[in-house]
Each structure stands twice: as C-alpha cells, then as structure tokens.
Amino acid sequence: MGDDGGGDGAAASASPAAGFSYFAVFHNYPLVAALLGFAVAQSIKFFVTRYKENRWDPKQLIGSGGMPSSHSATVTALAVAIGFQDGFGSALFATAAIFASVVMYDASGIRLHAGKQAEVLNQIVCELPSEHPLSETRPLRELLGHTPTQVVAGALLGFMLATAGQMFLVVASAV
C-alpha cells in the first residue's frame, strides 16, 4: 500500500521517544481552554463578591456554587475546544459533550437540591435545644449547586473562551 501522507510518519513523530517536555501541556488547547474557563469563572465570582459585599473572599476562587457556574464553563470549554481540534463529528467530541451534559445536569439538579436540603437541615439544627447531642454540629454547606441561569451563563462563558482561543490559534498560525 502507498503512503498517503498521514500514515506511519505522523505516528512516529508523535511517539514518546520523539522528545518529552513539561511545556507541551501548554500546547494542549482543550486542556488550556478548560482550565481558563474554570479560572475566569471563579475570578468573576471572586470580584463580584468584592464588589457586592465589599470584602475579599479567597474561598470564591475554589468554592462551588454561584454565578457563573465554573463547572459548566470548564466542561463546555473542554468540549468546544475538542470539537474545534478534532472535529465536531469525532467520537472524542461526542464523549466530551455527553460528559459536559452530565456535569451541568448534576450542577443544576442534584447538587442544587442537596444545597437546599442542607439549608433546611441547618435550620432544624439551629432550632434544637442546647442539650440535644446534634445542637453543636457544624453547619452543612448550603451553596453546592447552581440555578439553571448560572449553568447557562457558565456554558456561554466556556463557549466564548474556547471560541476566542480557536480564533487566536487560527490567527497565530497564519502569521
């Protein structure tokens, strides 16, 4: 069989023996897009808290819940970047899209309701008499999930970041 230009030569250059670099991870567009989606979403929450409550809250940089959903931004940026890189018809994009759907469903459904239940349980514990064994328990975290609006905002943020990254790559490769 003849060599069509995409056969064994491409596989040989991508082998681990071709050279290893820790900096290669910075050329992994889907990974960078996903991490950027997380970082930007968490930063937005951090600065919005500063603006609204006039205080710095470092927990906002890693905490869950709030607007926009960093979970949605992360998985949407990952899926869109994979779509741009490998094609929107690829099996890898399909896997990433399903993964993103499950994460966003979980964020707006299961984790949102778990947070509401935590709120009710915390209220019940507050109303217990002081001699009750559970009256001194630590409160449960209430801000676990996201409203559908927060999930959509995170998804739009992730989409915009991955699209901007792709446009940057196209412009950079043309130069």
Image (cartoon, helix red, strand yellow):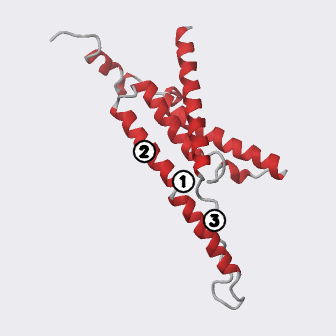
Is the C-beta separation of discs 1 and 2 under 8 Å?
Answer: no
Q: Can you give x and y, in whole percent of width and height, for residue 16 in the image?
A: 36, 28
Helix, strand or loop at label 2? It is: helix
Q: Residues within 10 Å of mark 3 (few under 14, many from 20)?
A: some
Q: Is residue 74 above or below residue 120?
A: above
Q: Residues within 10 Å of mark 2 (few under 14, many from 20)?
A: some
Which residue carries the number 1 mark?
A: 108
State left or right for residue 74 relative to residue 79: right
Q: Residues within 10 Å of mark 1 (few under 14, many from 20)?
A: many
* Disc number lying in front (1 or 2): 1
Q: Is residue 148 above or below residue 162?
A: below
User: Residue lying furthest right in this view?
Assistant: 54
Q: Which mark is residue 141?
A: 3
Helix, strand or loop at label 3? It is: loop
Q: Amino acid at mark 2?
A: Phe
Sequence-wise, the earlier of marks 1 and 3 is: 1
Report the front residue among 2 and 169.
Answer: 169
Is the C-beta separation of discs 1 and 3 under 8 Å?
Answer: no
Residue 121 is drawn in which quadrant?
A: bottom right
- Which quarter of the image is occupied by the N terminus? top left
Q: Can you give x and y, in whole percent of width and height, for residue 10 in the image?
A: 32, 17
Q: Amino acid at mark 3?
A: Arg
State left or right for residue 51 relative to residue 102: right
Which residue carries the number 2 mark?
A: 99
The residue drawn where x is 80% and y is 50% is 56
Q: Can you give x and y, in whole percent of width and height, for residue 100 in the image?
A: 46, 43
User: Residue lying furthest bottom in this view?
Assistant: 131
The residue drawn where x is 65% and y is 79% is 124
